């Protein structure tokens, strides 16, 4: 690894750290933001939703523009816009301004995400060095996401909520200056045109799907709005595939998915992020609503996940170069499965088991994500690095959003089904029991996004003795609902493990496929 390669890794890593940190750091600041602006939950949800939607809809467009017009150029654009939007967030005079700026942050974050990986892939042509670099790159992303809640809690407590945005200004300026000096430009040298119909259909399809997943548990999955959004996503997806198949220069080359290794990597990435982020949703619910911990203490309980990822991820890249991605992905999936089962076994409050579960999930995540990313990026031709990076990043975003939605909905559905019946002995009066159950569900707020979770709400009954019995019954239902969601994630991970056992390539196979694809592309060029 030469000096310019190391600098490219550090610079793109700094940009990546900013955007992944901001994805979750704002969560623990929401009560302070709500108090500062004096608003209710309805307006507050967009502080995070706008960021998530912005990332989801623009990610493939950013990848295409970067391939066409220069990955460094669009990396700089993304960092500059993200930094400017962060400043607007930090000085926002109203919640409306904050929400708009968060949406712009999300658009810029998608650009930084795909261009940083594409730049890194271009800077490391050697497969083993690329695996090591992607390992460090992944570690930076994971550490940024995992430290968000803990760091956010400390900053909000000591510096105020605006500090979590303003801190991006000096970092963003540093990344821009270093990028101009040390990062080499790269692009797809083949003559191409911008696929406007494909871009528009992708934005509509993914935007409708993402919004439906985020809003579904709040509005109800059978509500006209959510059904209409899913219908738009289905029709849009059909038209997108049809358009891309007929396009001479598609935004998303669907032939990439005929590469078995790449398709398996994409599918496994989806399942891994479904499980990891879904776990974070329900376990944060558990720590705050069942255990009654504050957001800061909740962040400290999640710290083993952060520390294990921070320690292992940089080293996993070296292991990928030595053993190939297959054994590490399989071991990582097993680690995630065991970690989730540890949470299931922890029941109502074994602190050591919860800490162990987070550590095991960190172990599994560290061993999964880097090899999956390496496998995907080394199994496609270098000319398609931006496109492949965009698809991979889209899967991370969609997988985490679906994980939030599905596991959050499992918990909400479990509470809706069992809570009224379990309160029968405690609150015999049906009308009063229904009111108490509604208050518990409302204060717990088991929605589709981790940002909308709040600690244990106000007392649901004036009688302290009766309130204790109500809380005990509700806590039992919470634990069972969380277990149901975690077991669903375990089932999906087991499927991914079995498919991967049969389908993941032995060391070097993905690289040989990429070399054959590059030869085909070279032969097809005029």
Image (cartoon, grey):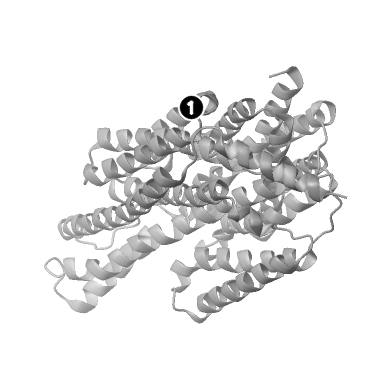
Mark 1 nearby-residue class (10 Å; few <14, some 14–19, many ≥20): few
Left or right: 467 with respect to 148? Answer: left
Q: Establish if 426 lies above or below 362.
A: below
| Image location (x, y in percent) of residue 393 | 61, 48
User: Which image quarter holds the N terminus?
Assistant: top right
Q: Establish if 294 lies above or below 484.
A: above
Left or right: 519 with respect to 482? Answer: right
| Residue 93 visible at all | no
Q: Establish if 57 lies above or below 30.
A: below
| Image location (x, y in percent) of residue 346 | 23, 42
| Image location (x, y in percent) of residue 325 | 50, 34
Left or right: 255 with respect to 144? Answer: right
Pick the residue in front: 136 or 455: 136
At 33% from the left and 56% from the top, the residue drawn is: 488
At 38% from the left and 38% from the top, the residue drawn is: 361
Pick the residue in front: 301 or 272: 272
| Residue 205 visible at all | yes
Residue, disc 1? 323
Per the image, label 1 sits on a secondary structure element best described as helix
Q: Quadrant for residue 131, please give it.
A: top right
| Image location (x, y in percent) of residue 209 | 56, 66
Pick the residue in front: 92 or 366: 366
Total numbered labels placed on residues in the image: 1
At 35% from the left and 64% from the top, the residue drawn is: 412
Q: Residue furthest bottom?
A: 224
């Amino acid at each position: 690894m030469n000096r310019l390669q190391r600098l490219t890794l550090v610079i793109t890593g700094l940009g990546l750290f900013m955007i992944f940190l901001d994805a979750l750091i704002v969560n623990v600041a929401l009560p302070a933001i709500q108090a500062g602006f004096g608003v209710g939950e309805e307006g507050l949800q967009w502080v995070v939703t706008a960021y998530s939607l912005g990332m989801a809809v623009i990610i493939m467009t950013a990848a295409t523009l970067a391939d066409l017009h220069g990955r460094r150029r669009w990396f700089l654009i993304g960092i500059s816009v993200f930094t400017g939007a962060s400043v607007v967030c930090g000085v926002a005079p109203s919640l409306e301004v904050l929400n708009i700026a968060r949406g712009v942050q999300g658009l810029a974050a998608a650009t930084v995400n795909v261009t940083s990986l594409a730049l890194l892939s271009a800077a490391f042509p050697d497969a083993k060095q690329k695996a090591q670099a992607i390992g460090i790159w992944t570690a930076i992303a994971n550490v940024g996401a995992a430290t968000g809640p803990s760091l956010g809690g400390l900053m909000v407590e000591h510096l105020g909520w605006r500090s979590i945005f303003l801190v991006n200004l000096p970092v963003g300026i540093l990344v821009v200056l270093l990028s101009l000096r040390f990062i080499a430009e790269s692009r797809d040298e083949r003559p191409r045109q911008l696929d406007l119909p494909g871009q528009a259909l992708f934005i509509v399809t993914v935007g409708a799907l993402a919004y439906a997943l985020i809003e579904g548990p709040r509005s109800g999955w059978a509500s006209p709005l959510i059904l209409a959004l899913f219908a738009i996503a289905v029709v849009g997806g059909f038209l997108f595939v049809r358009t891309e198949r007929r396009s001479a220069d598609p935004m998303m080359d669907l032939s990439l998915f005929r590469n078995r290794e790449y398709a398996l990597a994409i599918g496994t990435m989806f399942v891994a992020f479904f499980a990891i982020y879904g776990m974070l949703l329900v376990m944060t619910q558990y720590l705050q609503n069942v255990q009654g911990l504050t957001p800061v203490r909740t962040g400290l309980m999640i710290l083993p996940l952060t520390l294990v990822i921070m320690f292992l991820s940089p080293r996993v890249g070296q292991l990928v170069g030595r053993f190939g991605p297959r054994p590490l992905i399989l071991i990582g999936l097993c680690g995630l499965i065991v970690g989730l089962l540890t949470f299931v076994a922890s029941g109502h409050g074994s602190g050591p088991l919860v800490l162990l579960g987070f550590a095991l999930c960190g172990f599994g995540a560290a061993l999964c994500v880097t090899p999956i990313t390496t496998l995907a990026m080394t199994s496609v031709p270098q000319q398609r690095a931006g496109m492949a990076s965009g698809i991979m990043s889209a899967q991370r975003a969609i997988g985490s959003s679906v994980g939030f939605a599905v596991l959050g909905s499992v918990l909400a559905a479990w509470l809706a089904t069992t809570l009224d019946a379990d309160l029968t002995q405690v609150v015999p009066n049906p009308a009063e029991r229904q009111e108490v159950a509604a208050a518990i569900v409302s204060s717990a707020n088991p929605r589709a996004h981790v940002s909308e979770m709040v600690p244990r709400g106000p007392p649901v009954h004036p009688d302290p003795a009766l309130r204790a019995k109500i809380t005990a019954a509700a806590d039992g239902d919470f634990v069972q609902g969380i277990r149901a969601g975690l077991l669903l994630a375990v089932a999906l991970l087991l499927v991914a493990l079995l498919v991967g056992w049969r389908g993941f390539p032995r060391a070097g196979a993905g690289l040989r496929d990429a070399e054959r694809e590059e030869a085909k592309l070279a032969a097809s060029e005029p």
